[in-house]
Amino acid sequence: MHRPANARLMKQLNRQSVLAAVRDRGPISRAELAALTGLSQPAVTAIVRDLLELGLVEEKGLGQSSGGRPPIMLLFNPAARFVIAACLEGERLWGGVADLSGALQAEEEVALPADGVHDPARALGDFLEGLVSRSGMDPQRLAAIAVGVPGIVHRRGTVSHAPSLGWWQEVPLRAVLHERFAVPVVVENDVNLMALGEYFQGAGQGVVNLALMHVSDGIGAGILIDGTLFRGAGDAAGEVGYLPLGPAGPRRPDDYGMFEQHYSARSLYRRIQLAGLGAGLDERRPIRQLRELAAREVPQARQLLDDALRHWSYAVASIACILNPELVLLAGDAVDCGEDGLAFVQRTVAELVPMAPEIRFASLGSRAALVGAVASALSLADENAYGITADQ
């Protein structure tokens, strides 16, 4: 006979309340938990017993006596479960395994074939499976998965408009991963995860209204309003690569946006080559080398760099006028423009808008997305009580 759904829900909520209190306030006694959560002493005792059996809580030493026997103190055990965080790009895949404190226990990166025929979703699933296997973690202790991808990520966990992956129509990535791993899965735009990562551990700490503009093969932005990701009605907020910035021309539906067609790192590399400046150029760091050529007073290099900086400034100004963030972070290949380039963008934006935000470089580099993915996986695991149901 099944218990009423509301009884199961109440037990789950009570367990989550106790577990959150131990995690956030530990070491803490059972009596303190009862006072903090408003639950009865017997209810707290029963929940703690279950959590001890599950390994999510540990008994650690004795507390201060108030006249009787000193209480046994309780601590959260972050090693009881783990989460996986990963980021998928066109030819690169990297990720890590983290405990419930967010500490990474293992990290890996692999290159994907550039043949254009491999299945990125299958490659991602294989990578995650191998990552768990090589980490030595018990797969049964997996609590949640978070994955970042370049493209529009819809609330139902599908991905579309991802040129580097060849995904234009919606790909049900969350459903594919959930079916394979049978745990809660969050799929998020990779630049959104970068913004979260910088917010939690990087240059955006303490700033609840911020935007991050990432320049790489494409250009995208992650937006936080009141500390929460802003996605827009159609989940496409931050798709600044489609801004009408740059020379107008024909654009296929399955192509990059106008702005990123001309001012992404990939596009600037192509323009450098067309200008005859590409001898010995490193395709991986075109903006840094463009800056070095401009510093040597190569006229075409200076023109190309100034043109790129000016149009990046236009995008930042657009973000500032519409959202009025406190801070805009430049990330990805944009940091290779150097302090002089940053000053150029700051001056140009200040000349264009009535209230210019602070503009500075992101600080975590490529790790920002992984940090944001770990945070998202932990949040999802917390919402789902770390994979433990009320009947366990």
Image (cartoon, helix red, strand yellow):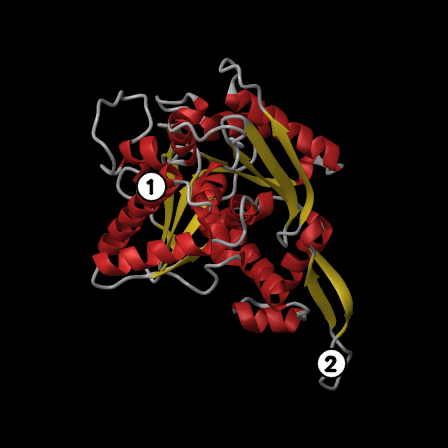
The residue lying toward the viewer, choosing from 71 and 249, is 249
Amino acid, disc 1: Gln
The residue lying toward the viewer, choosing from 349 and 17, is 349
Q: Is residue 42 above or below residue 79?
A: below
**Residue assigned mark 1:** 303
Give how far across and how far down residue 40 sits, in percent. Answer: 57, 68
Q: Is residue 179 above or below residue 357?
A: above
The residue lying toward the viewer, choosing from 160 and 308, is 308
Would you say residue 324 is visible in this rendering? no
Circle 1 SS class:
helix
Amino acid, disc 2: Gln
Q: Nearer the viewer, mark 2 or mark 1?
A: 1
Number of the label disc, if any, that sits on residue 160? none
| Horizontal arrangement in the rendering, residue 49 relative to residue 148 (left or right) | right
Q: Is residue 226 above or below residue 68?
A: above
**Residue assigned mark 2:** 64
Quarter of the image with the N terminus is: top right
Q: Residue at x 37, y 43 (%)?
A: 302
Q: Residue at x 39, y 54 (%)?
A: 228
Q: Residue at x 23, y 32 (%)?
A: 247
Crowdedness near tag 2: few (<14), some (14–19) or many (≥20) residues, C-alpha within 10 Å: few
Give how far across and how far down residue 218 sits, in percent. Answer: 39, 34
Give how far across and how far down residue 154 sits, in percent. Answer: 36, 34
Crowdedness near tag 1: few (<14), some (14–19) or many (≥20) residues, C-alpha within 10 Å: few
Would you say residue 310 is visible in this rendering? yes
